[in-house]
Image (cartoon, rainbow, N blue to C red):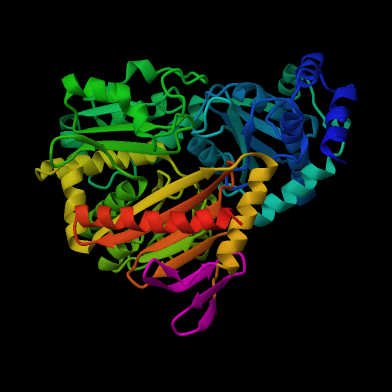
Amino acid sequence: MNYLEKYNKWLDSEYIDASTKAELKNISDKKEIEDRFYKDLEFGTGGLRGVIAAGDNRMNVYTVGKATQGLADYLLEKYRGTGSISVSIAYDSRIMSKEFAETSAKNLCANGIKVNLFESLRPTPMLSYTVRHLKSQAGIVVTASHNPKQYNGYKVYGEDGGQVTDESADEILGCIRSVEDFSAIKTMPYQEAIDKGLLSIIGEEVDRTYYEKVKDLTIRKDMVRQHAQDLNIIFTPLHGSGNIPVRRVLGELGYSNLHIVKEQELPDGTFPTAAYPNPENPDVFEFALKMAVAANPDIIFGTDPDCDRIGVVVKNEKGEWKPLTGNQVGVLLTDYMISSLKENNALKSNSFIVKTIVTTEMAKTVADSYGVKTEDVLTGFKYIGEMIRNVHETGKGTFIIGFEESYGYLAGDFVRDKDAIVAAMMICEMALYHKSRGKSLFEALLDLYEKHGYFKEKLISIELHGKDGQEKIKKSLHYLRHSMSRKVGDVNIVRKLDYKTGIEKDLIKITESNIALPRTNTLKFVLEDGSAFVVRPSGTEPKMKIYMSVIGNSLQNSENKMDAFEKLVMEIIQDSQSI
């Protein structure tokens, strides 16, 4: 069925409401119609995600209903004969989040599946915890994370509390595709679901158990108990779901000197002060920095709308406020947690950290210095959660921290996704510790650079929208995979890792070896001077992402090397797009 046939199917369906049909009829641009209907939203590294609008390739109550019916069919088959099935559901502050969550709940209940629905918005990591805590067979969180206000999304979690990984996602997607008509999507009235005992509304009783587990992760408990009030903090929740949870955890631990950015405090899916509510974007800290003039904090941080990512701003050696990258915060946390555990005689011989293949190699260098193992996984925190589960089930390792360059961190194993509440608490403890030693976080970072090398990373994202954009990404990766030079400038490429074929090639020794990771359309090139770059299509956005890394002998040297390296790499990318 082509896109026009699908478009007309929506217009002719008795299950589509009049306002949705009117929206579709008012589209005058055929390219817009094509983009809305040329494909269905598919599971990527973050489940479903798209612009809120009518159409198969958009987020709306019909695509959410179809996805949920497919999930229901998958669960009913997978857990056939095992007794009652339940799904836990949470949602954030985005436009339509509550409506999409309730649509999903009513659909699941109509299929005889019990639902635990949060009474109001909650962070994504609390959903991950709740799936495990309530022993649900699956979980759903309605969020588009840090995307602009036009977007919403739908993440699916397995019974281990982690985002579903490739095999399960493919099976769920197959079930979704089998829902060929809107008439197959079951639903029931909200109150009827409650009256029949299929829908339970949850809140404080679950929240409390989560908060206690987060606080138990504190390593230097005496220091925090005695001196938490000494740390001066500015926090912005960026109109999202992190406001109450972060403040509650920090408040109960004694961090009383906590200032909230009032302009960004309350939930608001239109994000009036941050068009792109992403803590990776320094612009979101504009109000916090204005507040810092009078408050003079030790640290500033902000969480994204679903409170799974966190960005940190600190003063540099010149007294200027400087945003730390996700890699820098991750390296600081890795060093702090391992060293603190070691000092407290709590570092186990089988301890390990987890990072993704696009995350800084400095984390491994730091972990190696303490004799701690590093596990590499594919891009996407679901693979970090999967690694924690696998090691936990075998009892062969003790997890310390997992993180990715895109501002996601996790400690503890009661959550299986990135958790900005846990991260906020650990960052405050770390900042308090370094302050007690007369150092800022920036000075602590410089100490690590001086000890391990001046690693520098950079991410370039190229937006390529629609069907044509997807074709361009495919052609670019084909060129990089088969036709590009074996040099970047004058420096030889010594290793080529193709995660789609699962083959790593040593271009010096002319040998090949297998990559023990699931297949994904990603390429990594490692050069003889230690620099590297990775190219991959985004799993959640219409983008091609290029990750670059270099190692220098000073801050300035690493910046100079990155500028030169970026220019050379982007020339290669431009060549790949001109074919």
Where is residue 280 shown, x and y percent of the image? Answer: 39, 38
Where is residue 338 shown, x and y percent of the image? Answer: 28, 57
Q: Is residue 268 above or below residue 214?
A: above
Q: Is residue 332 left or right of residue 24?
A: left
At horizontal 32% and vertical 60% (from top left) the residue drawn is 550
Q: Is residue 175 visible?
A: yes
Between 53 and 98, the residue placed more toward the observer is: 53
Q: Is residue 22 above or below residue 379?
A: above
Part of the protein shown in magenta: 484-513
Where is residue 386 shown, x and y percent of the image? Answer: 54, 56
Between 289 and 342, the residue placed more toward the observer is: 289
Quick one: which residue is furthest to the left in this view? 438
Between 429 and 203, the residue placed more toward the observer is: 429
Q: Is residue 249 visible?
A: no
Where is residue 356 shown, x and y percent of the image? Answer: 46, 57
Q: How many callouts does the rendering have?
A: 0
Q: In which quadrant of the rendered image does the N terminus lie? A: top right
Q: Is residue 529 left or right of residue 434?
A: right
Q: Is residue 120 magenta?
A: no
Q: Is residue 446 left or right of residue 206?
A: left
| Residue 107 falls in image quadrant | top right
Q: Is residue 20 above or below residue 214?
A: above
Q: In which quadrant of the rendered image does the C terminus lie? A: bottom right
